[in-house]
Image: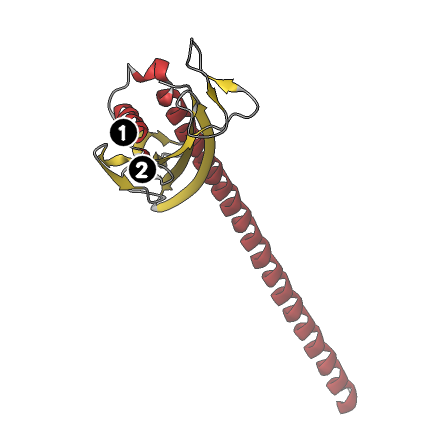
């Protein structure tokens, strides 16, 4: 027996609604899956960039420690290569007080013709490259800028040793006072054509030479 036309129309409409709801659910599930995949990819990228950033920070720290080590008078006698550039620059800045107060590039120019330091200078100390377990190569380097800040002020005391060598802490510059330096290290870590940078600056003093 044939169903009435009205009943057949209602059944057709219910079937059409079911198909539409199913399609909408499939679309929503697909969008949710794509969103979760994108979030996972972002987390992987963020984890990778965080690692490279940490490496850049460590390289900048290495540049500071490297500079402090070779600026120590007890170590400078055995300096060679890039370290000898730093030792020569330090000696030149000590001899010419007109160069004080400005950052000079340790790796560029010469002590007699120093070059102003530009952060991230292409002339840098290159460290050995690192290769990850996946075969990705990480290049590492740092550039150093040194500024002589003058003599370290000492208050409420006399300076120097030996008979007649004491100089009051006020008045003209005391030759017996320690020298004050600003060291800036700018690192670069390169991986897959992308460079990660980090800067660190410290102030140190060195004994009178």
- The quadrant of the image that shows the N terminus is bottom right
Q: Closer to the camera, 113 or 120?
A: 113
Q: Is residue 108 visible?
A: yes
Q: Quadrant of residue 31?
A: bottom right
Q: Residue at x 48, y 41 (%)?
A: 48
Q: Position of residue 128 (x, y in %)?
A: 32, 28
Q: Give the quadrant of the C terminus.
A: top left
Mark 2 and mark 1 in contact? Answer it, CB < 8 Å. Answer: yes
CA neighbours of label 2 inside 10 A, class few (<14), some (14 to 19), many (20+): some
SS for callout 1: helix
The quadrant holding residue 106 is: top left
Residue under label 1, please give it. Answer: 92
Which residue is tagged 2?
Answer: 99
Q: x, y (%) of residue 140?
A: 35, 34
Question: From the viewer's perspective, is 123 left or right of 196?
Answer: left
Q: Nearer the viewer, residue 139 or 78?
A: 78
Q: Nearer the viewer, residue 86 or 148?
A: 148
Q: Secondary structure at mark 2?
A: helix
């Amino acid at each position: 027996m044939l169903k009435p036309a009205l009943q057949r129309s209602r059944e057709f409409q219910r079937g059409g609604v079911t198909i539409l709801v199913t399609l909408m659910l499939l679309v929503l599930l697909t969008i949710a899956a794509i969103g979760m995949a994108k979030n996972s990819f972002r987390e992987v990228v963020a984890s990778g960039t965080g690692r490279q950033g940490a490496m850049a920070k460590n390289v900048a720290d290495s540049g500071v420690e490297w500079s402090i080590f070779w600026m120590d008078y007890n170590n400078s006698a055995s300096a060679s290569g890039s370290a000898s550039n730093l030792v020569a620059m330090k000696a030149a800045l000590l001899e010419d007080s007109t160069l004080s107060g400005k950052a000079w590039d340790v790796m560029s120019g010469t002590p007699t013709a120093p070059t102003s330091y530009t952060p991230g200078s292409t002339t840098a100390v290159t460290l050995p490259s690192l290769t990850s377990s996946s075969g990705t190569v990480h290049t590492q380097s740092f550039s150093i800028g040194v500024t002589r800040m003058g003599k370290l002020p000492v208050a409420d005391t006399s300076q120097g040793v030996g008979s007649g060598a004491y100089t009051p802490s006020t008045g003209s510059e005391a030759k017996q006072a320690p020298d004050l330096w600003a060291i800036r290290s700018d690192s670069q870590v390169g991986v897959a054509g992308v460079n990660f940078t980090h800067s660190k600056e410290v102030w140190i003093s060195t004994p009178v030479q």
